[in-house]
Amino acid sequence: MRRAAAGAKQSHRVAGLNNVGLRLGAGTLTIGTSMIRETHLRYEDQTGTERVLRLTGLARSGHAGIALSAQTEPIVGGEIAYARVVNESDRPVRLRWLGFEIDTGFSSASPARFFKHGYQSWSASHPVVVGHPAHQHSRALIIRISHQSEAERPEGTPENATSELFTIVESDSAHERFLCGFIGAANQFSTLTVNSPTRVSARALFDGAWIHPGQTFTVEPLAYWRSHQDAAQMAARWAELLGRRMNARTRAPYQRGWCSWYHYFDAITEDALCSNLRKLRELQREFPIDVVQLDDGFQSALGDWEYTNGKFPSGLKRIADEIREAGFTAGLWTAPFLATRDSHLMREHPDWFIRNQNGEPLPTVHNPSWTAGEDKSAYALDPSHPEFNQHQEHLFHRLAHEFGYEYLKLDFLFAAAAEGRRHDPALTRAQTLRRGLETIRRAAGDETFILGCGCPLGPAVGVVDGMRIGPDVAPYWGGDVEPGTRLAINAIIARSFMHRRLWLNDPDCLMLRASETRLSREERFALASAIAVSGGMLLFSDDMNLVDEHAQRLFRMAAGIGMEVDQASANGPPLARSLMRDTAIHTLLARGQQREFHLLLNAGEIPQEVSTAAMPTAGGVAKLIGPDGESEAREKIELPAHSARIVRC
């Protein structure tokens, strides 16, 4: 998400691993010996004593009937490491985690940065200086549960030095980069800690799952390589590897739609929804959308998704019928792994919940608007419980096939992966979350579009069609810490490489209205531009009575560029020109069918000047797209604070 030389030319050919039939790209190096220095397993034996089993280099090691083996497969520029644990004893043991110590080949004396990738949809992703992590205030437990794969990091793996799922290390002296990332995520969460430029500590988390006599635990594969490629190209290669291995669902059509949330929030009513539906039908030419999605605010209680409150007297089936009769796909929001104490589900099935150390249901979200209960909490449901899964299968089959909702937004999904006591102690948290998602997919059917949100990213690959890749937008800009549209834009750019590699990226909603908002005209254009050039899904969220002619033009611009970029993304996703620089200026490059789009965005508080001199024009004239329309692009562009421009080459 950070600044590179504006407009520097870059190839979109994504390099891949030869053993899985992916394309090989230029700019990679070859190595002769394994980069793995040690593999180690932490587990508890039959007495509850913690043990460490170490393997120097590769091959096999064992202790008291617990065997650990590891091997590597060469790839262009690096290796893929495979490991497995076998219980050859006559008693079960509990597995904690398995770690790889990987040499980067960089000098410890040279300044370096690493890309800290966030845990779930809303978690931040940004570069951090190695050895000097930025100060971070200690988070409350409920925040750590939602934004970290481990609420408490082990010694030697501080949160500010730890990335989730993958990382990139960039050394100033080496003029190259090192990527290390797990290319499987269905069975374990994984972290990568960078305490020094010389080494990455990669861990696959087993969460205390039991391994019984004769059983084998296979560790998710770990890929790592060095390259002179741009960091975003390396990230796209990693995403392609992960997506191919996990059969990512990347072929759904480009999504355009309307969502109720960012104007009405949980005050939405049936009358307001129907009023907007009539207006959307009248304005189909100006707003050519496919989906109308009802968000939070309709349910009788959190957890009782089939039943509406008094604001929606017609019920969910009739609402879906009206949306379809107006010519749109009916969409619905749920938080399938949460329930509050005032729900029928929690009162009737208290055993379906993840438990804390005291054996009580585990609170994972605090939201006063969801419940009249004193604690204002929502509690995490347990997809490892077979009866809860049966309930989910019935519920989502009914929502999709009986009620007619063919677009399902599943929110707050991290709840299913919260640390706690589960019904089935043999499952890891990643396996538990994936089991819950697979149950919903099976019930809703292959043809239903499923959007994940608030979701730990890895376990959802291959199950969801779309994924929110950043925090919520807002009708105000916000700052570095305050949630708002600025942080959402940062994430749109940082995770742009995932689009059509792991799913369709959901950048969250565009807000078009000029009234009842604190977003300025420049800020609204900046959000629309980031969404457009990212090629991601395009849903807007306004009272249709507030949209004017300027809003229509802004939507048409975002839809036109967005569709063109999305169609070209099969050949290469949009790429941030550098993920490894922390600056107010963001630059994103996307290919269209026969042209390029360069997003130049100033998220800072003062005007900035950027150059377009290096942008290729192929003999033509570069066009500058701004809030007032198109003009010829000049060599120097002045970007006001909180603004963006698109250069079309």
Image (cartoon, rainbow, N blue to C red):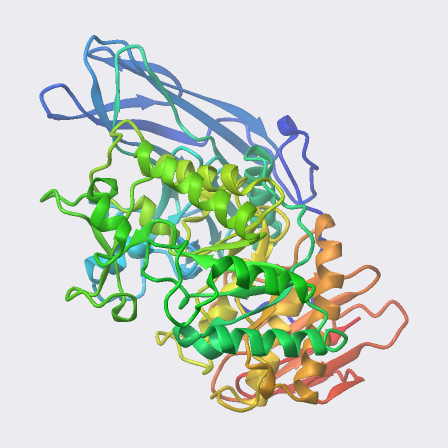
In the image: residue 637, left or right of residue 129: right
Residue lying at the far front in this picture: please name it. 314
Q: In the displayed structure, would residue 98 be above or below residue 416? A: above
**In the rendered image, is residue 407 in sight?**
yes
Q: In the displayed structure, would residue 307 be above or below residue 456? A: below
Which of these two is toward me, 461 or 432? 432
In the image: residue 537, left or right of residue 173: right
Residue 330, picture quadrant:
bottom right
Residue located at (13% from left, 19% from top): 46
Q: Residue 284, percent across and down?
A: 73, 73
Q: Residue 181, percent across and down?
A: 47, 41
Where is the C terminus found, in terms of image quarters?
Answer: bottom right
Q: Residue 152, percent across and down?
A: 21, 49
In the image: residue 46, left or right of residue 422: left
Which of these two is toward me, 87 or 137? 87
Q: Residue 551, percent across and down?
A: 65, 84
Residue located at (55% from left, 83% from top): 523
Residue lying at the far right in this picture: please name it. 619
Q: How many marks?
A: 0
**In the rendered image, is residue 507 in sight?**
no
Residue 628, picture quadrant:
bottom right
Residue 133, picture quadrant:
bottom left
Q: In the displayed structure, would residue 514 be above or below residue 288? A: below
Residue located at (34% from left, 28% from top): 38
